[in-house]
Image: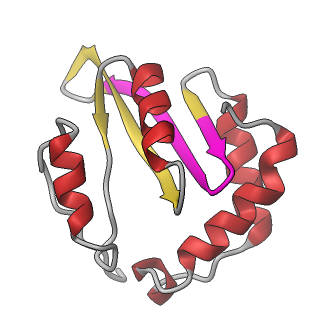
Amino acid sequence: MIATEADIPLIVDLALEAHKGSVWEDFAQADPESIRQSALALMERDDAAVFVCDRGVLMLARFPLWFNHDTLLTSEVFFYATKGGDALMREGRRWADGLMTVCRHDRTDPRLDKLYQRAGFVPIEHTFIGRA
């Protein structure tokens, strides 16, 4: 389930699929080459991981919490799954081994909030985007 370079075409396809109809579509076009480079860069890092299944991808990055470096935080970089999302999340949580953030964009089905809460996640912040 850990992604390899051979999984890049699937990751690009899933990311392009996720981008369509998302809030991100209002701000920037999806670029397949950028997606490929981003996935590869995360795969090469010791503090990041990319997990994939037949219809999903989860990209994570881990770093010290900015206000307490004794605490590691793993943050979702990208998560999209139309199938196998639960298995991806289990793998990601095992890898994270500590605090972990997940998110959803504003056009994602709000029922996802309840699934995250049932899994032990609590709302912590709301993120806003705009042009500077």
For residue 15, side relative to residue 100 (left or right): right
Task: Name, please, the residue furthest toward the front.
Answer: 83
Please give left or right for residue 81 compared with residue 42 in the image: left
- The reply to whether the magenta stretch includes residue 55 is yes
Residue at point 84%, 41% (across, down): 5
Q: Nearer the viewer, residue 78 or 80?
A: 80
For the C terminus, the quadrant is: bottom left
Choose between 23 and 85: the one closer to the eye.
85
Determine the image quadrant of residue 72: top left
Tell me where the magenta segment starts and ends, as one range: 50-64
Image position, residue 2 (x, y; %): 67, 31
Q: Is residue 55 above or below residue 97?
A: below
Where residue 114 appears, as percent x and y from the top left, is 16, 56
At a point 80% along the width and 51% down the height, the residue shown is 8
In this rendering, the answer to whether 84 lies above or below 121 is below
Does the magenta portion include 17?
Answer: no
Q: Quadrant of the N terminus?
A: top right
The structure residue drawn at horizontal position 62% and vertical position 75%, both measured from the top left corner, is 17
Q: Whole-percent x and y of residue 7?
A: 80, 46
Indicate the colouring scheme: secondary structure
Q: From the viewer's perspective, is residue 86 above or below residue 30?
A: above
Q: Residue at x 20, y 59 (%)?
A: 113
Q: Could you tell whether 12 is left or right of 124 in the image?
A: right
Give the main secondary structure of the magenta stretch.
Answer: strand
